[in-house]
């Protein structure tokens, strides 16, 4: 089962962005978590700049 890390960003009044980090099966969990840490650092930086940041992680099927 692949994993996706989805980051939704809102910057008032009307800008919205979505960042999707996808972990394919050939990547190790360590590589995925390293990517997730980088994504969380990005979220923190964006929050410091006034973005409303929401994080959600959903499992995705490979079927």
Image (tube, rainbow, N blue to C red):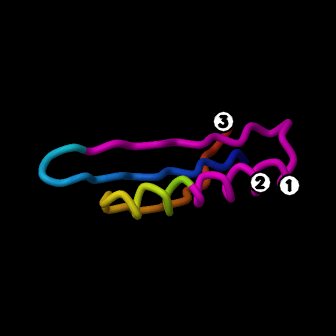
* Label 3 packing within 10 angstroms: few (<14), some (14-19), many (20+): few
Q: Are marks 2 and 1 in contact (CB under 8 Å)?
A: yes
The residue lying toward the viewer, choosing from 13 and 36, is: 13
Q: Nearer the viewer, mark 1 or mark 3?
A: 1
The residue lying toward the viewer, choosing from 26 and 34, is: 34
Q: Name the residue furthest front.
A: 49
* Label 1 packing within 10 angstroms: few (<14), some (14-19), many (20+): few
* Residue 61 position by quadrant: top right
* Secondary structure at numbered mark 1: helix
Give the side of residue 13 with respect to residue 57, left or right.
Answer: left
Q: Nearer the viewer, mark 2 or mark 1?
A: 2
- In the image, the segment drawn in magenta is 16-41
Q: Are marks 1 and 3 in contact (CB under 8 Å)?
A: no
Label 1 to label 3: alpha-carbon separation: 23 Å
* Label 2 packing within 10 angstroms: few (<14), some (14-19), many (20+): few
| Residue 30 x/y as whole percent | 86, 55
Q: Residue 24 magenta-drawn?
A: yes
Q: Nearer the viewer, mark 2 or mark 3?
A: 2
* Secondary structure at numbered mark 2: helix
| Residue 62 x/y as whole percent | 68, 38
Establish if 27 lies above or below 57.
Answer: above
| Residue 2 x/y as whole percent | 70, 45
* Residue of label 3: 63
Give the side of residue 47 with respect to residue 29, left or right.
Answer: left
Disc ID at residue 30: 1
What number of labels is visible? 3
Specify which label sits upstream in the sequence, 1 or 3. Answer: 1
Q: Residue 52 magenta-drawn?
A: no
| Residue 29 x/y as whole percent | 83, 54
* Residue of label 2: 34
């Amino acid at each position: 089962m692949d994993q996706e890390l989805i980051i939704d960003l809102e910057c008032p009044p009307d800008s919205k962005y979505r960042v999707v980090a996808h972990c394919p099966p050939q990547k190790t969990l360590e590589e995925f978590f390293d990517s997730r840490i980088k994504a969380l650092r990005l979220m923190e930086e964006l929050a410091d700049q006034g973005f409303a940041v929401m994080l959600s992680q959903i499992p995705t099927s490979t079927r």
